[in-house]
Amino acid sequence: MKREKPEIRIDKKEFYRTLTKLALPIALQSLMLAAVAAGDALMLGKVAQDEMTAVSLATQIQFVQNMFLGAVTAAGAILGAQYWGKGDKHTLEDLFNMTLRFCGILSVLFFLACELIPGALMHIFTHDAPLIAIGSSYLRIAGWSYLLTGISQCYLTMMKVSDHVRPGALISSFCVILNIILNAVFIFGLLGAPRMQAAGAALATTISRLIELALCIAVSSGASYIRPAFNRFLNLPKQLKADFFRQCLPLMGGSLCWGIGFTSYTAIMGHMGSDAAAANSVAAVARDLICCMCNGIGSAAGIMVGNELGAGRLDTGKAYGIKLKNISYVIGFLSTALVLAVTPAVLRMVILTDQAHEYLTWMMVIMSFYMIGRCVNTVTINGVLDGGGDTLFDMYSLIVCMWLIAIPLALVGAFVLHWSPLAVYACTCLDEVGKIPWVMMRFRKYKWVQDLTR
């Protein structure tokens, strides 16, 4: 593979200092969020396999919500990083207003769905009546946390793009640790609390989200922080709104393609039996934990490239993008090795049937190859390309690789050809690895090297 040479020499010491300053807190934040799912799986796995599986399926609703919220906050982050590089705080306040409005509407819609039709939502993922009952009770409580998540994510996004990534990461990390502690209290009935099992995990999440939002508002009251400008909350600049939607709509399309696609994978595996669903649930938790570093570098890549492009230093932004793309391959191969290394420990941590145990073993092996594509694409597409405003490509690649190849193969394999769950799981991992050549072709066109500010 031909390796690009940056057109200008970059200060490597400054580059790695900035990358570390941004990526490590974001990776920690991602790790802490994944740790909640891991904590739920481990603790509920000690209660019963059905409790663990039902909650894993129910949390797919939040996963879909996060796809919508992620598109809105990502659009705010793309423009915010460039306007922060330009030094325009007034426009950042308008962006904050915009993200709050849209995230607030989305949060209310998901809250109402969880409260009014939880059983119908669970039917999407399984026909198993006990799993539907457990999942429905979880969603009725967890729905309150979904009401708060959108607002706190807007605050955390603005902290991230305005050189306050560390306080945001500390808030998230503290609340995740609190969530895990409360999980143990309510799931197992410790310290005099009732033994609530799956419902206890939902209550722990809701309390943690409430505290997270309160901390975000309190910390953002500091003089150097970007805050919503409520005096012009309903009066948003038309040109900025147009720029926002120009970034947000492709991101929304890409997020929905990816989020609903991943949810489809979970639903397909959920209909292949409780053993396959349980193994897939544990594999998903392990995947999310190991992806934390590439998530951190991907987010840092978007901020670093966006800051340089917004400041008018297009050559430096391009050089940063090339360097970050090369780093993504290193992270990918390290993640592959890590998946294989932790597989024995993962197998010992949960109580599964013998069949589910065998499925999980081979799912981890299959996942190890998937990690290369996941890391390269996260940093290159969601970091570098999005940082320069090239947001349409992600949607195109997902439509082709996920929706026209991986999902149809998995559906046919599961319900027509009746393949084994492992073969179907392998189909769900095809899209990330298969699109790497296409991603590299797009990267080398350098359409992402552009200043989006006005």
Image: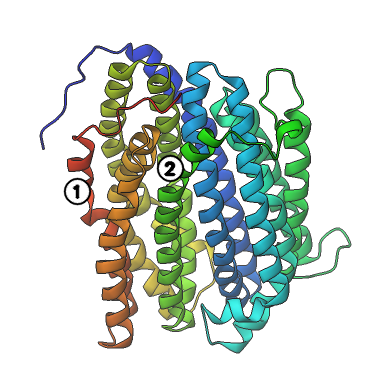
Asked which quadrant contains residue 306, the reply is top left
Q: Position of residue 410 (x, y in %)?
A: 30, 75
Q: Residue furthest front?
A: 238
Asked which quadrant contains residue 220, the reply is top right
Secondary structure under tag 2 reads helix
Q: Which mark is residue 438?
A: 1
Residue drawn where x is 17% and y is 47% of the image:
437
Q: CA distance from mark 2 to mark 1?
A: 23 Å
| Residue 347 makes an appearance in the image | no
The three-letter code of the residue at mark 2 reads Arg
Mark 1 neighbour class, 10 Å CA radius: few under 14, some 14 to 19, many 20 or more: few
| Residue 226 makes an appearance in the image | yes
The three-letter code of the residue at mark 1 reads Trp
Residue drawn where x is 33% and y is 47% of the image:
392
**In the rendered view, would you say 409 is above or below 65?**
below
Query: Foreground: 193 or 309?
Result: 309
Q: Which residue is mark 2?
A: 246
